[in-house]
Amino acid sequence: MKLHSIALAATLALGSLLVTVQAADSLNITLELPKPAHGPYHRPYVAVWIEDAKEQPVKLIELWREKPDWIKDLRRFWRKTGRSDQALVDARTGATKGPGKYQLNWNGDDNAGKAVAAGQYLLVVEAAREHGGRNLVKQAFNWDGSAVEIQVKAGSEIGAITLSKGAK
Amino acid sequence: MLSNKSRMSSEKMSSKKTAITTALGLLAAMFSLQLSAHTMTVVPSHYVQSKTGGWVSVDVSATNMTFQWDKGIPLDNFKVFTPDGQQGKVGSVYQGKRKSQADVELATEGTYRLELVNGSRFFTSYELKGERKRLMANKKDRATQLPAGAEKVMTTQGNSRSMAFITVNKPSDAVLALTNKGLEFQFDRHPADIVATEEVTVTLLMNGKPAAGVELDLSRDGELYRNEPARVHHKTDASGKFSFTAPVAGRYLLEASYQADVNNELTDKVREGFTLSFEAAMP
């Protein structure tokens, strides 16, 4: 888990770019990674994905990780998706990121690129950090054309999350 | 006790002798009780891995409290079965005082089975002049070994195994296949999918057929640090099933035992048992 400052700078630049291209019919997700006050810091492994009402994975949005050895520590992600879909893991893998605010979005597609049916879905964010802790956030939201405006309180490894989407 | 014996007068001798024999008998009973009270446990350092080519260290011990190592045991009968269902190679082994340890390489993707076999053992119990005794013999051999006047003769064949599963990347099923021999189990999901707070149903089978009345105990890590050990007893129903819910994520031990009258040429009864250590994942 080394710090790649060039990659980090590039990601931050890309992050600010994403803010400007938010689509009105996408779910916009703001995710904050906190800076822990104590101890040695290694950037966390983070997975962000969507599950349906039956808690089955639908779409992997982001996976920030380095060595394969430690992906298993994203326990839920590993069990639900990672262990059985290497191609998807490889396709979505991005470099780990340091403390900061990140803009992500979901356009309503599943992993195969097909639009999902209207209904209730879960935004799932899981983070695990070497010498740190593990956090899991599951936040339900409606995907039916209505507006979404949800704030999720910060935890130790995952900072505040906002979900927002304009009405169609 | 023996030094007392040497100081005894001759008239007291016979009554004291009876006392000693009874004490020895009691000691033997305690010893066998202790043997059965010890639980053979096989616990890998990791149940889940996200990389092939790595290793796990496996702890094997006879324990009283779940996952508190009490006695290291020989690993001659410790086996690993690789995801293709074949027996694989065990790396370095070490027998310590409190636990034994084996290294196991996880070269390929899939599910591995670790297994310690306490092979088929026969013992015959009997009563001689009101005293319970036993000898290690099957039904065929017992006739020549039993003393004259032996009563209530009963031969039992004991089989037990201690197991754990390790899954690297995608779970696979070859090492879960039933042999239809002895006491076996079938989970309603892959062992790598046992998650805290989710109900799991297990079918117990004896020689391939659902076995009713199998006694099971489910315990979890940390007994040393709780007032209540929190062991849960289960018994399989008429269809050989029982269900449990792991309350919290962590390491668990399932112990099963089953007795049946078989009355074949080698034994009157069979006593089958197994222990399985597993982890309940975080939801």
Image (cartoon, coloured by chain):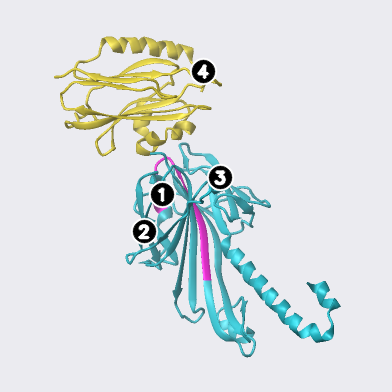
How much space separates mark 1 and mark 2, taking CA atoms?
15 Å
* Mark 1 touches mark 4? (CB < 8 Å): no
Is A31 located above or below residue B106 in the figure? above
- Label 1 resides on the chain identified as B
How much space separates mark 3 and mark 2, taking CA atoms?
28 Å
Identify by letter the chain in cyan. Answer: B
Q: Residue at left 59%, top 55%? A: B63
Image-quadrant location for residue A28 = top left
Residue A37 is tagged as 4
What is the magenta range? B158-174
- Percent coordinates x, y for residue B226 in the rendering: 53, 46
Q: Which residue is mark 1?
A: B191
How much space separates mark 1 and mark 4, taking CA atoms?
38 Å
- Percent coordinates x, y for residue B134 in the rendering: 61, 77
Residue A150 placement, left or right of B171: left
Marks 1 and 3 on same chain: yes
Residue B242 is tagged as 2
How much space separates mark 3 and mark 4, taking CA atoms?
31 Å
